[in-house]
Image (spheres, rainbow, N blue to C red):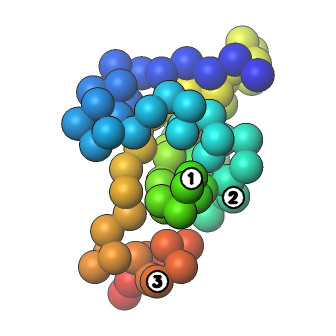
Amino acid sequence: MKIVFRIHALQRMALRRISAEEIRTVISTGETIEDYPDDRPYPSRLLLGFVAGRALHVVTAYNAVADETIVITAYDPDPQHWEPDFRRRRP
């Protein structure tokens, strides 16, 4: 699978100390918790994964023509905005 990192994603990853390897782990083992099929130019999704006990959210888009996953951003989910399992947003 080809993974492309947007500049925004790389900037946020550096700021948040999230490695490319951690992103790859979330993409390969994480679960989709939200789908955004109407996003443009490509449908996207929010993934939740755990790496060494650290919860990470990764937003990716999929370019089917090029068969590539595009990393849009990544972050540590904020417990104030997410339920304890980090799968659902708090009301």
- Expressed as whole percent of the image width and height from the top left, the position of residue 6 reads 42, 21
Query: Which residue is at the far left?
Result: 15
**The label number, if any, that marks residue 51 in the structure image:** 1
Circle 2: is it few (<14), some (14-19), or many (20+) Cα within 10 Å?
some
Upstream in the sequence, badge 1 or badge 2?
2
Q: Note whether 73 is above or below 47 in the view shown.
A: above
**The label number, if any, that marks residue 84 in the structure image:** 3
- At label 1, the amino acid type is Val
| Tag 1 secondary structure | strand
Alpha carbon distance from label 3 to label 1: 17 Å
Q: Quadrant of the C terminus?
A: bottom left
Between 69 and 54, the residue placed more toward the observer is 54
- Expressed as whole percent of the image width and height from the top left, the position of residue 56 reads 48, 55
- At label 3, the amino acid type is Pro
Residue at the (46%, 83%) spot, across then down: 84
Residue at the (32%, 39%) spot, across then down: 17
Circle 3: is it few (<14), some (14-19), or many (20+) Cα within 10 Å?
few
Which quadrant of the view contains residue 43? top right
Q: Note whether 30 is above or below 11 in the view shown.
A: below
Alpha carbon distance from label 3 to label 2: 16 Å
Upstream in the sequence, badge 3 or badge 1?
1
| Tag 2 secondary structure | strand
Between 37 and 32, the residue placed more toward the observer is 32
- Expressed as whole percent of the image width and height from the top left, the position of residue 77 reads 38, 63
One can see residue 81 in this view: yes
| Residue denoted by label 2 | 31
Alpha carbon distance from label 1 to label 2: 13 Å
Residue at the (28%, 79%) spot, across then down: 80
Circle 1: is it few (<14), some (14-19), or many (20+) Cα within 10 Å?
some
Query: Closer to us: mark 1 or mark 2?
Result: 1
